Image (cartoon, rainbow, N blue to C red):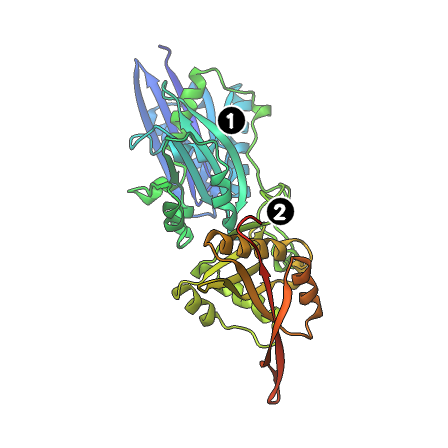
Amino acid sequence: MEDLHILAFETSGDVCEAGLLSRTGGRVRLRTARHEGRAGHTERILPLAEQILAEAGLDRSALSVVAFGQGPGGFTGLRVACSVAQGIAVAQDLPVIPVDSLMAVAAQHEDDEPDGSHVVLQDARMNEVYAASYQCTDGGRWQAAQAPRLLALADIPLWLEKGPWGADAPVRVHGDALLVFEGLAEQLAALGYRICPAADPGHAHAQVAMVARLALSDWEAGRAVGAGQAAPIYVRDKVAFTIQERQAGLGGNPQAPALNAVTLHAMRESDLDEVAAIERQVQAFPWQRNHFADGLRAGYSGWVVRKMGGMAGFAMVMDAPDMAHLLVIGVRPDAQRKGAGAQLLAQCEAHARGRGLGALTLEVRPSNTGAIGFYRHHGFQHVGTRKDYYPLGRSLREDAWIMTKTWTEQS
């Protein structure tokens, strides 16, 4: 077994690290040095490398290969590690091994239970995450099942639902997003995924020690590349949406297709600020946030639709003995006539049918001709009137039309 020395760098997060993995006489030794803090990577990275080389009694000429964590992660940090690794490799005529930083996070948990699939969710700021999944082969080598990509926070459940998981294989979730985003771990646990918070919070981020070990595995598999071929993993090609785009509800990777044009999930407490904001935009006398909260506590059923993470609309129904009552439905003004309202209405009907109820009913202002046309298009009929049901202001009232859609068991 040949002796070798791997110099490794990891700067994809807030910590700047250098490591030296040495295998001499069949024994492996790892030295590391680090600098805490997102700033200062450029100034610190080479002194850290020189420090550990000096501790080992080596200079750069003794190196066999240079490795670096290629991300995804912070743009500046990734460029620092990549450029320094390339510079040393060119000067010493050495190959380079880029290492997937999210794979390093997964591999840091291999002593727990390496079988099954390992999902890594890493905070990407702006309510987004870097996401990927990995498996450890019987030979102990890690491989990507889903390459890193950028997701809006709200799209994580859908992405996981579409994952390539075996029917009985456990799916474990790692990464600092579980620590950063309140309620995410509990939400995913409720969906059946195994949450694996690191005993050491530092293991929620890639560490240079694992980057070096993965580089050793790649070296043995002949996966080193020339310095000119080494590159970071960028999954956010457009760094950010404009303010106007974000106000319109856009999130996630601007260069990647949406996971779905419109996604739907059950309304949760964490949705209510957005729900109430949309309600204020579309109603002259809106429900308040506490009204929605009270409805959820009372057992009413609610749903929200999202487009690339931004909420497009919502609905809430109450079950009665023989029918479901659509209490409230709203679609953000700039998302109207794009399918969100139809999807919500279809969900309300499916809910009623699933409960064995024979109809879905609602109230609407006679002056709201657009809404009346929408409901008629979806099979609702005007079946009655409630006098002076809605407030108009200045002590005035407006009637409510009762519109109902009925079906037979076979329809």
Residue type at tag 1: Ile
Give the percent coordinates (x, y) of residue 277.
Answer: 55, 67
Q: Taking 102 as reference, is 139 left or right?
A: left
Give the percent coordinates (x, y) of residue 20.
Answer: 38, 27
* Residue found farthest to the top: 1
Q: Residue at x 67, y 59 (%)?
A: 336
* Residue found farthest to the bottom: 395
**Which type of secondary structure does the marked residue at label 1 adopt?**
helix
Question: Where residue 88 is drawn, which disc sits there?
Answer: 1
Q: Considering depth in this image, is 359 or 94 the residue closer to the camera?
A: 359
Question: Where residue 352 is drawn, which disc sits there?
Answer: none
Give the percent coordinates (x, y) of residue 189.
Answer: 36, 46
Q: Considering depth in this image, is 212 or 58 the residue closer to the camera?
A: 212
**Which type of secondary structure does the marked residue at label 2 adopt?**
loop
Report the Cα–Cα distance between label 2 and label 1: 46 Å
Q: Considering depth in this image, is 393 or 104 the residue closer to the camera?
A: 393
Residue 125 visible in this rendered orientation of the protein? no
Up/down of 348 relative to 56, above or below: below
**Where is residue 217, by image quadrant?**
top left
Q: Considering depth in this image, is 408 or 294 the residue closer to the camera?
A: 408
Q: Taking 278 as reference, is 195 left or right?
A: left
Which of the two discs, 2 and 1, labels the residue nearer the N terminus?
1
Residue neighbourhood size for the residue with mark 1, other residues' Cα within 10 Å, grouped as few (<14), some (14–19), many (≥20)? many
Residue type at tag 2: Ala
Residue hosting label 2: 261
For the N terminus, which image quadrant?
top left
Q: Give the mark toward the camera: 2 or 1.
A: 2
Residue 136 visible in this rendered orientation of the protein? yes
Q: Residue at x 67, y 74 (%)?
A: 366
Q: Are marks 2 and 1 in contact (CB under 8 Å)?
A: no
